[in-house]
Image (cartoon, rainbow, N blue to C red):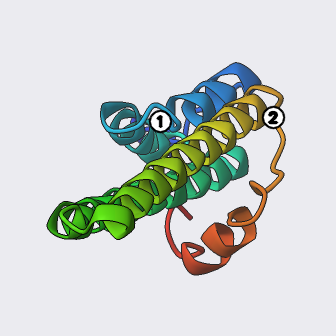
Amino acid sequence: MSDTPAPSTPPAVSADEDNTIAIISYLFGIGFVIAAVMFSSKKTPLSAFHLRQSLGLIIVGIAGWFVFIALGIMAAVLAGIPVVGFVLIKSISLLNMAYGLGMLVLWIMGILGAANREQKPLPVLGALFQQKLATLFT
């Protein structure tokens, strides 16, 4: 018998675990952090793909939040102008709702793709997320 320990191999990742990391990545904030930590010990292509998609959504969501704050400040300043203020406030409000609905649809599509174990980029921005964030989660 030999006293030398056998080389350690990374634990095999089951399809369920791979799927779990991918789904958790879409739970913004703490879910994304948990998925990233889980990914560090169980790296799979599906998890990496969905972590990049989710991070892209988070970045776009935060950027949109800042844009709508700036637009809201602008609308508040211009609200005193009778017609312009009203039209501006209503337009920004409609844009904000459309943006929020679009983000919700993309988020649901991401979760469904992760649940179905698909590596299909999100519409409009998904391919850009994969390209720009390609060096992350490898």
Q: Amino acid at mark 1?
A: Ser
Q: Residue furthest top?
A: 16
In the rendered view of the protein, which quadrant contains the C terminus? bottom right
Identify the residue at image location x=75%, y=65%: 124
Q: Label 1: few (<14), some or many (≥20) within 10 Å?
A: few
Q: Label 2: few (<14), some or many (≥20) within 10 Å?
A: some
Image coords of residue 121 (percent x, y): 78, 57
Of pointers 2 and 1, the one earlier in the residue sequence: 1
Note whether residue 13 is visible. no
Q: Amino acid at mark 2?
A: Arg
Image coords of residue 10 (percent x, y): 54, 41
Q: Is residue 5 left or right of residue 22?
A: left
Identify the residue at image location x=43%, y=38%: 5
Q: Nearer the viewer, residue 37 or 89?
A: 89
Identify the residue at image location x=68%, y=66%: 125
Image coords of residue 100 (percent x, y): 52, 43
Residue underneath mark 1: 2
Residue underneath mark 2: 117
Q: Nearer the viewer, residue 15 or 109?
A: 109
Q: Quadrant for residue 107, please give it.
A: top right
Residue 50 is tagged as none
Marks 2 and 1, Cα distance to the nearest angstrom? Answer: 43 Å
